[in-house]
Amino acid sequence: EIVLTQSPATLSLSPGERATLSCRASQSVSSYLAWYQQKPGQAPRLLIYDASNRATGIPARFSGSGSGTDFTLTISSLEPEDFAVYYCQQRSNWPPEYTFGQGTKLEIK
Amino acid sequence: QLQLQESGPGLVKPSETLSLTCTVSGGSISSSSYYWGWIRQPPGKGLEWIGSIYYSGSTYYNPSLKSRVTISVDTSKNQFSLKLSSVTAADTAVYYCARGPKAGTPLDYWGQGTLVTVSS
């Protein structure tokens, strides 16, 4: 089973600052990694798939990078609506099993 | 626009079976391109994948829950369902249904989620 470890657990920043969130896999997942944003009372929203591809309608300030075991989600300049919890996720090729990281809470400083 | 909607009881007694249905609209559950899955989130905690199903009926379960989970599909109603047996308070969570491309990593469409509380 692949374990995803996110860091930090909590990130305190101000609007306009740059946010860098990390996700590390216990073994290589190639580029098969996704990122989600979740706000209170809402379902997760897909931001990034295949490590670096923005999902439909996602602003350009969100970017993803990495491959193998180390991945990064970057928000170039934080908007007030970006403060939320972020999860990374991978899917094994076969059988198709999904795992999530434990999440990073991005809070207003 | 694809939409998924969970439905089912919001309260289940300990030791009983939790049953939820996900209704898909704006697209066909019989597409050969997607898996349809269940994910849950205990209050204040992270996301846990429960299992997925293909339109043909092939199922894939989280090994940690496999002994208690059954997922089924009804293509005539464009629905898929979750049954979780022998529930305890630890199964209290928001339950989401979602779609995942067969050839891809992510879960690209999600239902709004439904809170299921296990309590007597």
Image (cartoon, coloured by chain):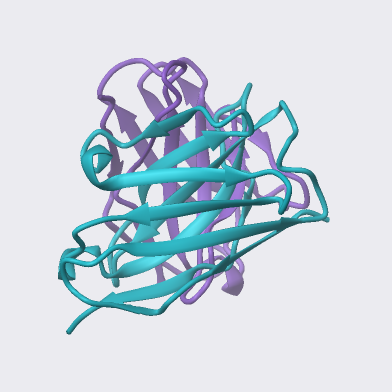
Q: Residue furthest bottom?
A: B120
Residue pictured at 37% horizontal, 25% vertical:
A70
Q: Nearer the viewer, residue B108 or A70?
A: B108
Q: How many marks?
A: 0
Q: Is residue B15 left or right of residue A32?
A: left
Q: Quadrant of residue A23?
A: top left
Q: Quadrant of the N terminus of chain B?
A: bottom right
Give the drawing colour for chain B: cyan
Q: Residue A1 at what x, y percent from top left?
A: 25, 24
Q: Nearer the viewer, residue A80 or B120?
A: B120
Is B98 situated left or right of B85 in this image?
A: right
Quarter of the C terminus of chain B within the rendering? bottom left
| Along the viewing direction, whichever of B61 and A93 lies nearer the viewer | B61
Q: Position of residue A25 (x, y in %)?
A: 31, 27
Q: Residue at x 42, y 52 (%)?
A: B39
Report whether B28 appears left or right of B20: right
Task: Examine the rendered structure and indicate whether residue A36 appears above or below residue B6.
Answer: above
Q: Residue at x 48, y 24 (%)?
A: A66
- Is residue A94 positioned above or below B27 on the image? above
Q: Is residue A68 visible?
A: yes
Q: Is residue A12 visible?
A: no
Residue A22 placement: quadrant: top left
> In the visual, does B82 lie left or right of B78?
left
**B57, above or below A80, in the image:** above
Task: Identify which residue is drawn at 32% across, 31% down.
Answer: A24
Closest to the observer, A88 or B37: B37
Q: Position of residue A17 (x, y in %)?
A: 52, 60
Q: Position of residue A108 (x, y in %)?
A: 42, 74
Which hue belongs to chain A?
A: purple
